[in-house]
């Protein structure tokens, strides 16, 4: 997220796609997580965390936002912290475009359904929702 206006556009897109309220808990990951944290707090989101700041992996966060390098690792980091009905948004920058299929596959393996992909200056913001994942786990 190089320039301020591009960063603003990315976070606005992520918020629009995941639709969090100011009281929803949001977990962020990726090399751009501190910038995401600052932008979210500036917009009034009170409960924002990173996997490193959470003492125990509990399924309590409604939203996961991931940007920067190592997107697959970011997905794996936030997954244990997400509710069974969570939403995620991931910024896939042009240099990481070849990972798009792997990211889609990983999300689907974790019970997420891809809902939208929106192009912005920084790349593609992909959003997905996980509905009734707990039921899927119990059935397996």
Image (cartoon, rainbow, N blue to C red):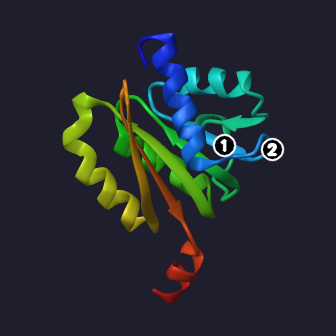
Determine which residue is flagged by label 1.
Answer: 26
Return the x and y of residue 32 as percentages of the image width and height: 48, 24
Corner quadrant of residue 36? top right
Say above or below: 20 vs 95.
below
**Is 36 placed left or right of 108 in the picture?**
right
- Return the mark for residue 42: none
Label 2 SS? loop
Residue 67 left/right relative to 132: left
Instruction: Say which residue appears at 41% left-offset and 13% top-offset.
Output: 2
Looking at the image, which residue sits at the far left? Answer: 98
Direction bottom: furthest residue: 139
Q: Quadrant of the C terminus?
A: bottom left
The residue at 65%/20% (across/down) is 38
Task: Tell me whether the residue at label 1 lies in contact with that at label 2, contact meaning CB atoms closer than 8 angstroms.
Answer: no
Residue 51 shows in this picture = no
- How far apart are labels 1 and 2 at the CA level? 9 Å
Residue 71 placement (x, y as % from top left): 37, 40
Q: Nearer the viewer, residue 135 or 7?
A: 7
Q: Is residue 40 above or below residue 92?
A: above
In this rendering, which labeled residue sits more in front, label 1 or label 2? Answer: 2
**Secondary-structure class at tag 1:** strand
Q: Which mark is residue 23?
A: 2
């Amino acid at each position: 997220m190089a320039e301020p206006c591009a960063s603003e556009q990315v976070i606005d897109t992520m918020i629009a796609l995941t639709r969090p309220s100011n009281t929803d808990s949001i977990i962020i990951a990726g090399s751009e997580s501190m910038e995401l944290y600052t932008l979210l707090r500036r917009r009034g989101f009170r409960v924002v965390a990173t996997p490193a700041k959470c003492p125990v992996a509990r399924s309590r966060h409604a939203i996961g936002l991931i940007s920067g390098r190592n997107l697959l690792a970011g997905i794996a980091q936030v997954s244990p912290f997400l509710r069974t009905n969570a939403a995620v948004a991931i910024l896939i920058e042009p240099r990481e475009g070849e990972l798009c299929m792997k990211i889609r596959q990983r999300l689907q393996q974790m019970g997420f359904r891809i809902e939208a992909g929106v192009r912005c200056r920084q790349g593609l913001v992909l959003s997905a929702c996980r509905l009734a994942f707990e039921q899927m786990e119990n059935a397996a």
